[in-house]
Image (tube, grey):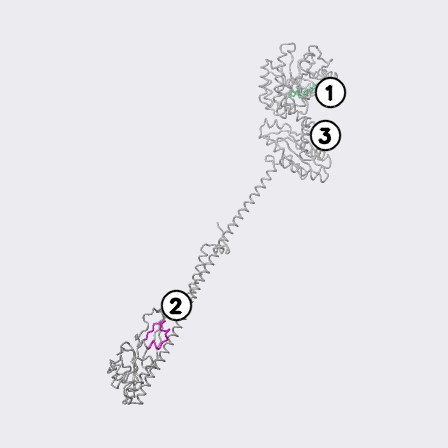
Amino acid sequence: MDKPASAPTLFVRGLLNPAFPALIFLMFLAIALGLQYGIEKQDRSQIHTNLNNKAESMANRLEREFMVHADAISRMAKRFEAEPEMPREVWERDARNYLSDFGVYQAVEWIDRNFIVRWIEPFEGNEDAVGYNVAFSPERQASLEEAQTTGNLDISGVIDLKQGGRGIVIYAPIFKGDANNGFVAGVFQMGTLARELLTSNALESFRINIGEGGESAYELNSSTDTDPEFSHTVDIELPTIDWTLTVTPSVSWVEEQQSRWPFVTFIVMLFMGLLTSLTTLLVQLILKRNQALLKTRRELDAEISQRQAVQQDLARLETTDTLTGLANRRFFMEDLAHTLSIADRQMRQAALVMIDLDRFQTLNDSLGHQFGDELLIKVAQRLNGLSDERVMVAYSGGDEFMVCQQHVDDIDDVIHLLGQIKQCFEEPFLVQGEEHGITATMGVAVYPQSGLDADTLLRNADVALYRAKEQGRNTYQFYTEGMQEREVKRLELDKDLNHALANDEFVLYFQPQLDLNDSSINSVEALIRWQHPRRGLLPPVDFIPLAEESGRITDIGRWVVMAACRQLAKWQNGPYANLRIAVNLSGRELDDESIVEHIQEALEANGVSADRLEVELTEEIFIQNIEHNLNQLTKLHKLGVHLAIDDFGVGYSSLGYLRDFPVDLLKIDRSFITEVTRRHDDAVITRAVINLAHNLGIQVVAEGVETPEQLNFLKNHRCDLIQGYLISRPIPAAELEKALSAGLLNVDTPVGS
Ligand code: C2E
Ligand code: CA
Ligand code: CA
């Protein structure tokens, strides 16, 4: 719903309405018209006034002149009264004088008392008038008779003159009453009167009408183009006659009188209106543009803040690992660099701990990536519990985590942190409804001893981690001088390992196992060696972990099985046909689904019976990934291959699996045998293991037997087989054959060096 607009908003909207400039223009137009009308009205009234004045003055002049002329006629009549016997010539001379003095008159007459014209001056042209009776109508007669009686002037009014045209006759009686001796009369034409009496300019500019008794008696300039609006009529005060003077100005006179102000005002106002509305239009455009700009600005602002939010999200994502929610490697490294510079300034130490989850790869491969991801999340959660302002935890990728510890004053601080990390792995992790015990191996590099910059520190922590892994899992290792060299060597070896198989650089050495029951040798353990082109003969510890890490162990394992089978085939029909070969399989090798088929193929390809082959697996393989391994081992067992548990007694306390797996042989780890004659614990354990195995129908091998004392102990406790330097070191097949045929392999004469 739209909210109601506020008053100012409405005002602004009104201002911005497109009709607004037009409205302004119309307003100005109205004002212009009004002003024009007003000024014009005033103008016209001024013209009227001017015309009135003109007409009045004309009328006054007419009256005055008329009276002057009338007086002249009266004076002539008086002269007649004074000289009744005036001879005609004298009268005529007087009359001529009058005519020349008073130009209006056309003629002067003497009319006898019977109203007959007797004399007339000038005579020429007026001959017809002589003898004319001027009392041509009863009205005229009555009027003349009254003048005779009263002695007053009589004026004829405008009449048709005997001489032609229209004119007026003024009659001045000579003596009144019975003594009356007729009249002296002045005749003039109206045109002459008007022309003589009115100024010439008036004549040009006006139509002049003389009205008598309400009717037009005479009109001058009737052809003039006039403006009837401005006609003005005034009364003319004359004895006995009732005249009006109507003055009608010519169009040109009116135009002359008219001022230009109304027009100018109109135009000016119109122009102002146009200007104002154009200005308004302009202002509107500017305002609209401004509004559009403001809107764009607002939209831009919104977009900018949106982008900033996105950027913040991105920045957060860039610093965080999406799976674990921990800081990612990149961010960790940036922070580490920063931490190191602070540590440098404060003369303090800082520690970088690389954490690698033991057996993670195995779990991930066998239980699936989903499982792996969930496990990583759980581990991340626990590790993150350690983070505070001095400890930063990050996920490095794969199964590796990194921890940076600031403000390290001495090495105990780091040891304490390592203990805390170890504690995180004490409780099993609940993943996909099952508990999984996981351990971690750690490599530690301390600034500044183990590296002066973040990258070096990281590399060295990695080296230390690798060393820790070599020493067995679930432990930690600090980086020390010399590790770097080993690391370089390791990397080189890793490179060389690429070609070792193709170049056929691996060899199998064999170490015999002595049967204590009858002092016979029925089995040998195949132990791999690498005949390195530059480094010489390398023991498995130098390359097996490398191969496990890179995955090359699978191919190497297949080669070992194949080589063992070939050896068995060679011995098959000779004096050593009784020998069984035990091969070592690492956990990674057993993960390979096709390992069982491969073993079967190798046996078949060499025509070797399966019970000639034994597979040694470390104890932990039986614990991890039980279902999968049980399946593989059962298949192997069904083939007829013997199964041995290698390095028994190390690390794992649960013995339950011995019941479930089809195990033939158990190899007590060398670590128990070494001190079996000196350490009571080891003796107890060894005895217990032998008894336990025998109870389960499993034979026991003791590894690493080096002394006759150890041999005696084992013999006394009914150990089935012994293996160790006391009998023989691992030796090549040819040497083994020689020793066997020479009967050297017994407890008295150890073989190999
Ligand atoms: P392992 O399976 O426990 O092999 C026994 C190791 O103990 C051998 O070391 C052997 O030389 C050594 N040994 C035997 N008797 C004595 C003794 O009296 N005293 C002492 N101090 N040592 C003795 P080696 O050959 O260096 O092999 C080391 C490990 O490498 C083996 O331990 C095995 O886990 C692994 N390995 C060897 N060959 C292979 C192989 O073909 N495949 C795999 N996956 N691992 C192998
Ligand atoms: Ca072994
Ligand atoms: Ca062993």
> In the rendered image, which residue does mark 2 sit on?
255
| Viewer-proximal residue among 494 and 503 | 503
Q: Classify 10 Å Cα crowding around label 3: few (below 14), some (14-19), many (20 and above).
A: few
Locate residue 528: give its quadrant: top right
**Residue 590 vertical position relative to residue 522 in the rendered view, above or below:** below
- Percent coordinates x, y for residue 535 in the rendering: 69, 22
Front position among marks 3 and 1: 3
x and y, in percent, of residue 544 in the image: 65, 23
Identify which residue is drawn at 54% across, 46% down.
Answer: 300
Query: Closer to the observer: label 1 or label 2?
Result: 2
Determine which quarter of the picture holds residue 427: top right
Counting residues from the start of the chain, the first of labels 1 and 2 encountered is 2
Task: Please state the horizontal and vertical placement of residue 22, each as a whole percent of the image.
Answer: 44, 57
Dot 1: element: loop
Front position in the image: 482 or 390:
482
Q: Is residue 720 visible?
A: no
Q: How many marks?
A: 3
Q: Which range of residues does the magenta coloring cover?
A: 193-210
Q: Are marks 3 and 1 in contact (CB under 8 Å)?
A: no
Q: Which residue is mark 3?
A: 481
Return the x and y of residue 603 as percentages of the image width and height: 59, 15
The mark that comes first in sequence, 3 or 1, is: 3
Query: Residue 469 magenta-drawn?
Result: no
Amino acid type, callout 2: Glu
Which of the labelled discs sits on residue 19, or is there none? none
Q: Amino acid at mark 3?
A: Glu
Disc ID at residue 676: 1
Can residue 446 be seen from the camera position used here?
A: yes
Q: Nearer the viewer, residue 77 or 53?
A: 77
* Mark closer to the observer (2, 3): 2
- What kind of residue is marked 1? Val
**Majority SS type along the magenta span:** helix
